[in-house]
Amino acid sequence: MRRNWDLVIYILIGCVVAFGAYWAAVQNVSDEALVKWGGLALNTSVLFGYAIKQYWRFRRSTVFWAVMGSVLIIHTLIFYLLLRNVHQWRLAWFLIMYPIELPLITVILDSAMRRFGRQHRGGTPHA
């Protein structure tokens, strides 16, 4: 059953990406806008997907989802303000942000789960 669910998720992700590419082509989205906003969407998906995977054991916790949602809103708002005011943004610059954002998200989630969650087992990656 788990494999079926994973397959459904992968198909949905593929459909979203295909629709986004189709929409960008039909709307004649500029390369600059595609790098900025497409890069933000990809970066955010990878960053928060990884964080959710690392903290999956807390998936039934309201605190976890409230904190994750709050951090996601803050992340998106900061990048929206940044990208709206920067004329040229390179896709690789998102990669520079990972060593800053990922530890920050980890500290915030660890702190919230330790303080408000029922049990805490650290945010270290596991297989």
Image (spheres, rainbow, N blue to C red):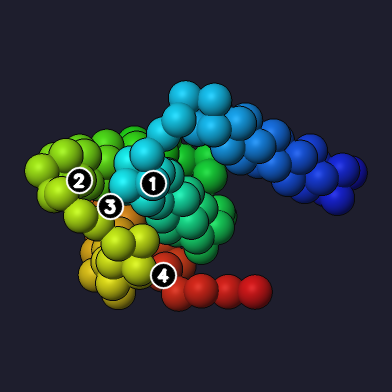
Question: Which residue is under mark 2?
Answer: 83
Residue 100 in view, yes or no: yes
Badge 4 density bin: few <14, some 14–19, many ≥20, Cα 10 Å: some
Q: Position of residue 45 (x, y in %)?
A: 47, 49
Identify the element where label 4 is drawn.
loop
Q: Amino acid at mark 4?
A: Gly
Q: Name the residue rendered at 20%, 55% in the picture.
A: 88
Q: Amino acid at mark 1?
A: Asp
**Relative to the observer, which residue lies in front, 38 or 125?**
38
* Mark sitting on residue 77: none
Question: Which residue is under mark 4?
Answer: 122
Q: Amino acid at mark 2?
A: Leu
Query: Pointer 4 and pointer 1: residues touching (CB < 8 Å)?
Result: no
**Relative to the observer, which residue lies in front, 81 or 113?**
81
Badge 3 density bin: few <14, some 14–19, many ≥20, Cα 10 Å: some
Q: Name the residue rendered at 27%, 41% in the picture.
A: 76
Question: Which residue is under mark 3?
Answer: 112
Circle 2 or circle 4, nearest the eye: 2
Q: Name the residue rendered at 81%, 45% in the picture.
A: 7
Q: Earlier in the sequence, mark 2 or mark 3?
A: 2
Q: Earlier in the sequence, mark 2 or mark 1?
A: 1
Q: CA distance from mark 4 to mark 1?
A: 41 Å
Q: Amino acid at mark 3?
A: Ala
Residue 78 in view, yes or no: no
